[in-house]
Amino acid sequence: MKKPLLIVFLVLLVDQVSKIWVKTSMYLGQEHRIFDWFIIHFTENNGMAFGLEFAGENGKLFLSLFRIVAVGGLFYYITRLVKDKAPQGFIMSISLILAGAVGNIIDSAIYGKIFSSSYHQIAEFMPADGGYAPVLYGKVVDMLYFPIVSGYFPNWFPVWGGEYFLFFRPVFNIADSAITLGVIFIILFQKQYFAENKPVDEEDTFENPEANQEKVVSE
C-alpha cells in the first residue's frame, strides 16, 4: 500500500497547496497570465469536475455525500487490488482517481467553514465571524485555464458553422487533472490491466492429467 498512499499524498499536497495559495492571494475572477495559452484564473464551482453544476443546493449536498461514499469504496477497492496483486499500473490509476476525489471533497467539506468569501476580496483564513458556507456546502477552487486555440468555425461546418470556439474552455484544478489522468490511463492500457492471467498448465494438469503426461513423454 506504500506506493498508492504516496501517490494520494503527493497529489493532495500539490492540489491543496495550489488551492490555498489561490484562495488566500486572489479574488474571484482575478487571473495571472503565464503564457498566452496558460492562465491562472481563480474561479469556484458548486458541482462536478471542470465547473459543471448539479441540481442546486440539494444537488451540492448529494454530490458531497456521494463523493465521500465513493472515496470509501475506492479505498477499499485499492486495498483489494493490492492484496490480489493486480497490475501496478491499474493500482496507480485508481490511486490518481482516489486522490482527485479526496482533493475536491476537502474543498466541499471544510473550505466553507475555514475561509471567508472571495467575492470582490481576498479570502480570510479562519474569519472571526465564520466562513461563507456550512460543512459540505463549500465551493471547489479551480485555477488552471488553457485557452490553447480559438477562432470561428467555417460557415460550411455542420451545426456550429460561423460560431466562435475556444479550446480548452473549462477551468480546472490538480484534483480534476488526477482524475482525468487516471481514467485516461485505464482506457489506454485496459488490455494490459484486465488481461486474464490463467495458469493454463496447472489447469490442464488438474483437468486432464493423462493428456499432460502424454505431452511430457512426447517432449
Image (spheres, helix red, strand yellow):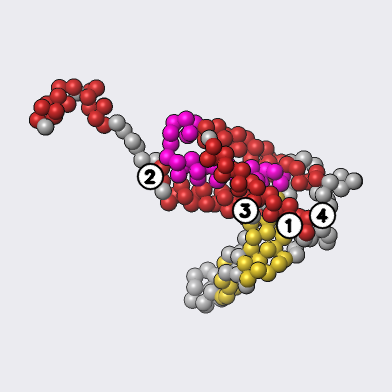
Q: For the residue marked with disc 2, what is the amino acid?
A: Gln
Rounded to the nearest angstrom, the CA distance separating label 1 from label 3 is: 13 Å
Rounded to the nearest angstrom, the CA distance separating label 4 from label 2 is: 46 Å
Query: In the rendered structure, does residue 99 fall within the stretch colored magenta?
Result: yes
Q: Residues within 10 Å of mark 3 (few under 14, many from 20)?
A: many
Which residue, given by chain and number where applicable, does mark 2 sit on?
A: 192
Q: For the residue marked with disc 4, what is the amino acid?
A: Ala
Res 7 label: none
Which residue, given by chain and number where applicable, does mark 1 sit on?
A: 22
Give yes or no for contact between labels 1 and 3 (Cβ–Cβ under 8 Å): no
- Between disc 4 and disc 1, whose residue precedes? 1
Name the secondary structure under disc 4: loop
Which residue, given by chain and number where applicable, does mark 3 sit on?
A: 174
Q: Residues within 10 Å of mark 4 (few under 14, many from 20)?
A: many
Query: In the rendered structure, does residue 81 fall within the stretch colored magenta?
Result: yes
Give yes or no for contact between labels 4 and 1 (Cβ–Cβ under 8 Å): no
Which residue, given by chain and number where applicable, does mark 4 sit on?
A: 123
Rounded to the nearest angstrom, the CA distance separating label 3 from label 2 is: 26 Å
Give percent across and percent down for residue 55: 69, 47
- Residue lying farthest to the bottom in this orientation: 155
Q: Quadrant of residue 34?
A: bottom right
Q: Residues within 10 Å of mark 1 (few under 14, many from 20)?
A: many
Q: For the residue marked with disc 3, what is the amino acid?
A: Ile
In the rendered structure, the answer to whether residue 149 lies left or right of residue 23 reads left
How many numbered circles are shown?
4
